[in-house]
Amino acid sequence: MLTVSRVPNDTTIDIHLANRNRFECRTCPYQMVLDRRYYERKNMKRKEVEDVLGGEESWANVNTTEGQSEAAGRSGWVAGRVAYYYQLQIRSADEPMTTFYKWRE
């Protein structure tokens, strides 16, 4: 919505239009005062989320390493688990490669 914040010297505003929202033409003196609330409700469809990194098939032929993972309980760290990992060059060549890890179930 447009409101009149600055008025040229040769233009006068009626006192009943002051402090009211309105649409105005920038080339002629027409003004449409908004006397009620105008809105339109539109429900947007959600898009399907696609896996950017390839999904489950991207983990098919990847390297493995021994690692440590946090246990579900209070027992601390569990050693000796196997993790899948692969490296991907996401950023420019002078940046290090990004490593993605996934624990074997």
Image (cartoon, helix red, strand yellow):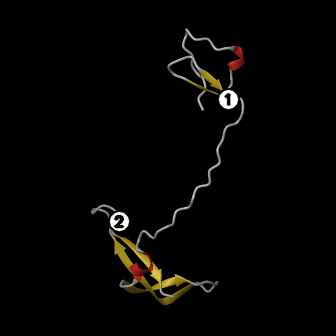
Judge whether 67 appears above or below 91 on screen.
below
Q: Quadrant of residue 5?
A: top right
**Residue 60: image location, x then y, percent:** 39, 84
What's the CA distance linking mark 1 and mark 2?
51 Å
- Disc ID at residue 90: 2
Near mark 2 (Cα within 10 A), the count class, few <14, some 14-19 or many ≥20, is: few
| Rendered residue at 39%/73% (across/down) | 99
Q: Quadrant of the N terminus?
A: top right
- Disc ID at residue 34: 1
Q: Are the residues flagged by discs 1 and 2 in contact, CB closer than 8 Å? A: no
Judge whether 42 appears above or below 92 on screen.
above
Q: Quadrant of residue 71?
A: bottom right
Q: Nearer the viewer, residue 13 or 87?
A: 13
Lower sequence index among marks 1 and 2: 1
**Residue 55: image location, x then y, percent:** 44, 76
Disc 1 is placed on an element classified as: loop
Q: Nearer the viewer, mark 1 or mark 2?
A: 1
Q: Nearer the viewer, residue 92 or 3?
A: 3
User: Which residue is most to the top?
Assistant: 10
Judge whether 93 appears above or below 16 on screen.
below
| Rendered residue at 40%/86% (across/down) | 65
User: Which residue is most to the bottom?
Assistant: 80
Amino acid of disc 2: Ile
